[in-house]
């Protein structure tokens, strides 16, 4: 019999307790991973906007509660364009609209037709809208497929019957699932004349992107620059709060899990005190005795982590289908989520095991043998 | 310098438990290599306490316990001592209920650098030695009292100890199982193993080379010939 066999037999002997402990770990891991995957998915959805335009960096209003509430006026956009090293700065207005139950959060991008090519938009069917039209729209190819619309069809949006004049592709899933309108038209629909949400900046070859971005932020401190999705919180404080809530919930889940693990292990220690005393009397070292107890818990933690990840997959998939989250939440299962699950399970087990294993380590064989 | 022919040497040992209970009040005892000794006496006389000191699971308040030439007070790692130098048999076998007979015998061999395979082979051999070949996969609940005690003996012999210590080993056995147990003890004794048994049973004491009688934490008699009348008076 190997040490691992012994661990397995001990766990098998107390099946109900082992399953209980495993589920406690799994539920805690599921909570942590589901929150992480959900927030990461929401963050990814929100941050996807910055990767639509093929820009070196994006400029937004600093500290806006969300990207969609960011406002950059005409003067600010002009100053960005005048910053040394800036090749181009394309202003776009991004809004969302409820189209139908399958598209509760439909993305609408207002952009001048002259900026489309620089923004990375390819017209794959039909043609671009005119700069001054109030009733023309281009649909992303995914949106067109989802809505079953073609060039020449009509698309009801912003209280207007728009003609689909073209189908476009950006190579970005987020951008291709939306629609593009002439910028003045969408500014008019939303009563935001001269306002854009984001500015997509390209830098002259030979200039440092970081330096130019820093200069823009320095010249206009009310604005912030974003180069990566990680920096997105600068222009979307909701995501910062969301991440803080996720972190807080993670700590809480770990603590609750650790208490359950510790309680179960302590119960196991009390029940098996004579057994541990016996093993010590046969010459088992403290380390080996503690390893047995810890090994049992760690095995349950690792299996619990696996079960927790599987449960979180189910939970987030169900959540993503809820009407309120459909189209917004795309569960983002990354390798990091799996490591986080394992880390959560191990930290939880370590904290929970601290006291029981300390007690096991100081157990006197004689006292343990006479324990009733 | 201890006598190399002595397996056990206990000098002026006292053991005072909290509440000033004097379990042992100055015990001197020597056991020669290969000798079988029975310790008897009324309940509470300190005989189990003495056995616990020899087993290295308790420490004396004063005095010294030397086993195989090593003073237990000077040994830093008593786990190693318990694993290699002594084998323990209890009154109620104390087998681990979740493990088979074979696995129970393997338990003391963990930490001895024997591979899993070698542990298994040795455990099988020991079970065969106590006439339990074919019982390897049985759980303790599937064994009779006598069979369980024989598994416990096999387990005590797992690491080929210098001294076998038995605390009331026949206390929970019927007469047939007791006879079988005593045969085994005699076999082990004749193979040169040192055996120290704590017992209330006259038939067990009768198998010892020497019977030591304790009372109130002291040795009051040590005789080489088993005397039934004296034994009856002492217990």
Image (cartoon, rainbow, N blue to C red):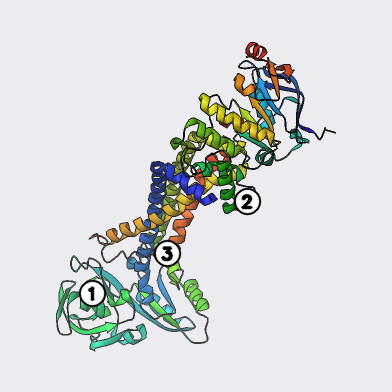
Q: List x then y, in percent, for residue A292.
A: 54, 45
Q: Quadrant of residue A56?
A: bottom left
Query: Disc 1 sits on a residue from what chain?
Result: A
Q: Quadrant of residue B153?
A: top right
- Establish if A34 lies above or below B20: below
Cβ–Cβ under 8 Å for marks 3 and 1: no
Residue at (70% x, 40% y) in the render: B77
Q: Secondary structure at mark 2?
A: loop
Camera-nearest label, 1 or 2: 2
Let me know if residue A359 appears in the view.
no
Let me know if residue A100 appears in the view.
yes
Query: Disc 2 sits on a residue from what chain?
Result: B
Q: List x then y, in percent, for residue A302.
A: 46, 54
Q: Secondary structure at mark 3?
A: helix
Q: Which mark is residue B114?
A: 2
Residue at (72% x, 30% y) in the render: B35
Name the residue nearer the viewer: B160 or A56: B160
Query: Disc 3 sits on a residue from what chain?
Result: A
Q: List x then y, in percent, for residue B120.
A: 56, 49
Q: Earlier in the sequence, mark 3 or mark 1?
A: 1
Mark 2 to mark 3 CA distance (whole Å): 58 Å
Camera-nearest label, 2 or 3: 2
Q: Which mark is residue A69?
A: none
On the image, numbered disc 1 is attached to which residue? A188
Camera-nearest label, 3 or 1: 3
On the image, numbered disc 3 is attached to which residue? A233
Name the residue nearer the viewer: A369 or A27: A369
- Establish if A350 lies above or below B45: below
Q: Secondary structure at mark 1?
A: helix
Counting labels gives 3
């Amino acid at each position: 019999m190997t040490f691992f066999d012994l661990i397995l037999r001990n766990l098998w002997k107390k099946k109900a307790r082992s399953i209980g402990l495993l589920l406690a770990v799994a539920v805690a891991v599921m909570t942590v991973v589901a929150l992480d995957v959900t927030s990461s998915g929401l963050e990814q959805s929100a941050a996807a906007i910055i990767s639509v335009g093929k820009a070196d960096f994006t400029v937004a209003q600093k500290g806006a509660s969300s990207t969609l509430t960011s406002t950059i006026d005409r003067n600010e956009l002009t100053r960005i364009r005048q910053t040394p090293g800036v090749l181009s700065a394309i202003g776009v207005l991004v809004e969302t609209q409820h189209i139908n139950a399958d598209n509760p959060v439909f993305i609408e991008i207002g952009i001048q037709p002259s900026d489309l090519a620089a923004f990375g938009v390819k017209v794959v069917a039909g043609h671009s809208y005119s700069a001054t039209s109030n009733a023309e729209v281009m649909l992303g190819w995914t949106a067109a497929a989802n809505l079953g619309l073609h060039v020449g069809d009509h698309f009801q949006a912003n209280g207007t019957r728009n003609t689909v004049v073209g189908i476009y592709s950006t190579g970005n899933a987020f951008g291709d699932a939306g629609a593009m309108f002439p910028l003045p038209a969408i500014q008019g629909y939303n009563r935001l004349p001269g306002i854009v949400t984001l500015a997509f900046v390209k830098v002259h070859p030979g200039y440092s992107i970081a330096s130019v971005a820093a200069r823009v932020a320095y010249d206009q401190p009310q604005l912030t620059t974003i180069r990566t999705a990680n920096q997105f919180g600068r222009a979307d404080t909701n995501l910062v709060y969301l991440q803080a809530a996720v972190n807080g919930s993670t700590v809480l889940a770990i603590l609750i899990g650790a208490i359950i693990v510790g309680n179960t292990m302590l119960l196991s220690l009390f029940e098996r005190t004579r057994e541990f005393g016996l093993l010590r009397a046969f010459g088992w070292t403290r380390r080996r005795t503690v390893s047995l107890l810890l090994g049992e818990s760690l095995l349950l933690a690792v299996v619990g982590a696996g079960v927790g990840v599987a449960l979180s997959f189910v939970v987030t998939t169900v959540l993503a289908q809820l009407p309120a989250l459909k189209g917004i939440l795309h569960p983002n299962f990354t390798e990091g989520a799996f490591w986080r699950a394992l880390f959560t399970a191990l930290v939880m087990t370590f904290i929970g095991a601290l006291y029981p294993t300390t007690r096991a380590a100081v157990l006197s064989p004689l006292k343990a043998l006479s324990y009733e | 310098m201890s006598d190399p022919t002595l397996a056990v040497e206990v000098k002026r040992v006292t053991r005072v438990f909290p509440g000033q209970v004097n379990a042992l009040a100055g015990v001197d005892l020597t056991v020669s290599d290969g000798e079988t000794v029975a310790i008897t006496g009324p309940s509470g006389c300190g005989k189990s306490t003495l056995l616990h000191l020899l087993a290295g699971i308790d420490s004396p308040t004063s005095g010294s316990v030397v086993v195989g030439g090593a003073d237990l007070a000077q040994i830093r790692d008593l786990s190693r001592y318990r694993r290699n130098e002594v084998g323990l048999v209890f009154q109620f076998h104390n087998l681990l209920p979740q493990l088979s007979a074979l696995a129970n015998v393997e338990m003391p061999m963990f930490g001895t650098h024997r591979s899993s395979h070698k542990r298994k082979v040795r455990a099988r051999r020991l079970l065969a030695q106590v006439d339990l070949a074919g019982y390897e996969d049985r759980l303790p609940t599937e064994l009779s009292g006598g069979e369980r005690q024989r598994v416990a003996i096999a387990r005590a012999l797992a690491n080929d100890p210098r001294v076998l210590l038995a605390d009331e080993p026949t206390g929970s056995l019927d007469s047939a199982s007791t006879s079988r147990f005593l045969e085994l003890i005699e076999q082990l004794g004749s193979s040169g193993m040192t055996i120290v048994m704590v017992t209330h049973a006259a038939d067990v004491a009768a198998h010892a080379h020497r019977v030591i009688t304790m009372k109130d934490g002291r040795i009051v008699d040590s005789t080489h010939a088993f005397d039934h009348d004296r034994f009856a008076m002492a217990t």
